[in-house]
Amino acid sequence: MVRHKLDLSNCIILCNNCIGGFLYHDFSQKFQSPTINLQIEADGFLRMCSNLEEYMEKTLIEYDSPDNTRLFAEWHTHPFPIGYLGDVKIFFQHYHSFGEAKDAWKKRSKRMIELIKSGAQVNVIMIRKNVGGGNTRNLKSCPLPTKSISIK
């Protein structure tokens, strides 16, 4: 079976939504990236990936706003933590509290930085919900290996 032949232990997957976590899980690998169980808007995700070291040094800050209630209603979802890493907005849909999300982010960011220093390969996967140009040009300017997946 392919799953047993693919070793992602020296591979970091940065993904702007939950798909990266599914890849790690499906291949029975440890989560090597902080971008697990969350969603990041495309433009912010590309800024972060293009300046990864700079963003990993930033402090994750909770975003608690009355606008969140409207967002949860629009998305037809339960309330979940939202944070900012510098100017990048991060939606932690699969976490119960901001503290839980921040702890996981810090632990996985540290692990990722250690792996990068040891020569691990960093791969960026961006999931786009619309099949139009837009962020594809920006994705090509990212200094890391990238893959774009479009869904309808």
Image (cartoon, rainbow, N blue to C red):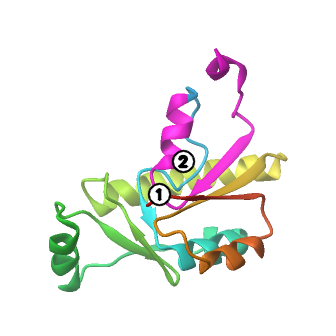
65 versus 42 height, above or below: below
121 versus 9 height, above or below: below
Label 1 Cα crowd, 10 Å radius (few <14 / some 14-19 / many 20+): many
Asked where in the image residue 52 lies, by quadrant, the reply is bottom right
Residue 12 included in the magenta stretch of the image: yes
Residue 53 included in the magenta stretch of the image: no
Q: Tell me if 18 is positioned left or right of 33 in this view.
A: left
Q: Are marks 1 and 2 in contact (CB under 8 Å)?
A: yes
**What residue appears at the point 62 percent right and 78 percent down from the top-left corner?**
133
Q: Which residue is mark 2?
A: 20
Residue 1 in the image: state x and y as whole percent. Answer: 64, 14
Numbered disc 2: secondary structure: helix
In the picture, the disc for residue 17 is: 1
Instruction: Pick whichever, 89 or 77, lies toward us.
Output: 77
Look at the image and give the residue range highlighted in magenta. Answer: 1-26
Q: Tell me if 25 is positioned left or right of 140 in this view.
A: left
Residue 83 in the image: state x and y as whole percent. Answer: 38, 73
The amino acid sitting under disc 2 is Gly
The amino acid sitting under disc 1 is Asn
